[in-house]
Amino acid sequence: MGAVGWRLEKRKPIQISVKINDFVTQTKDISPTGVYADYANSDLQPNQKVSLEFSYLDNTFSLESGIVRVDPNGIGIAFRNLNKENETLLNTLF
């Protein structure tokens, strides 16, 4: 059973390539509402807006997002302003 995120969504421990602004890294886990990504020594701050891009199972996402957590190993990112199509697809995939 996966961990539960800050929005009480079940997270899947999936490693996929993700682009955060212009920085490319790997996710550690993902849920329908956000991701936790490797990003040691990040200069990003909580509440900062970021662009997020990733592909999974032939689906490509380009999402408006926000930083919700920063720790020494990575960052927690919440998806923001999802359209209904992306929301439904993320719920189906994750």
Image (tube, helix red, strand yellow):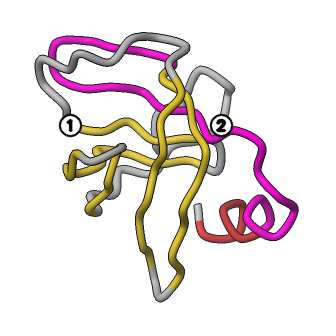
38 or 41: nearer the eye?
41
Q: Residue furthest front?
A: 22
Mark 2: few/some/many CA within 10 Å (<14, 14-19, 20+): some
Residue located 42% across and 27% down the image: 76
Mark 1: few/some/many CA within 10 Å (<14, 14-19, 20+): many
Instruction: Locate residue 34, reporting x and y percent.
Output: 55, 41
Horizontal side of residue 39 vs 2, given as left or right: left
Helix, strand or loop status at disc 1: strand
Write the start and end of the magenta stretch as one range: 68-88
The amino acid on which the numbered mark 1 sits, given as a three-letter code, is Asp
Q: Residue furthest bottom?
A: 58
Which part of the image, by quadrant, shows the C terminus?
bottom right
Residue located 48% across and 23% down the image: 67
Residue 89 vertical placement versus 29 (above, below): below
Horizontal side of residue 45 vs 37, given as left or right: right
The amino acid on which the numbered mark 2 sits, given as a three-letter code, is Glu
User: Is 71 covered by the magenta stretch?
Assistant: yes
Horizontal side of residue 82 vs 90, given as left or right: right
Residue 9 image label: 2
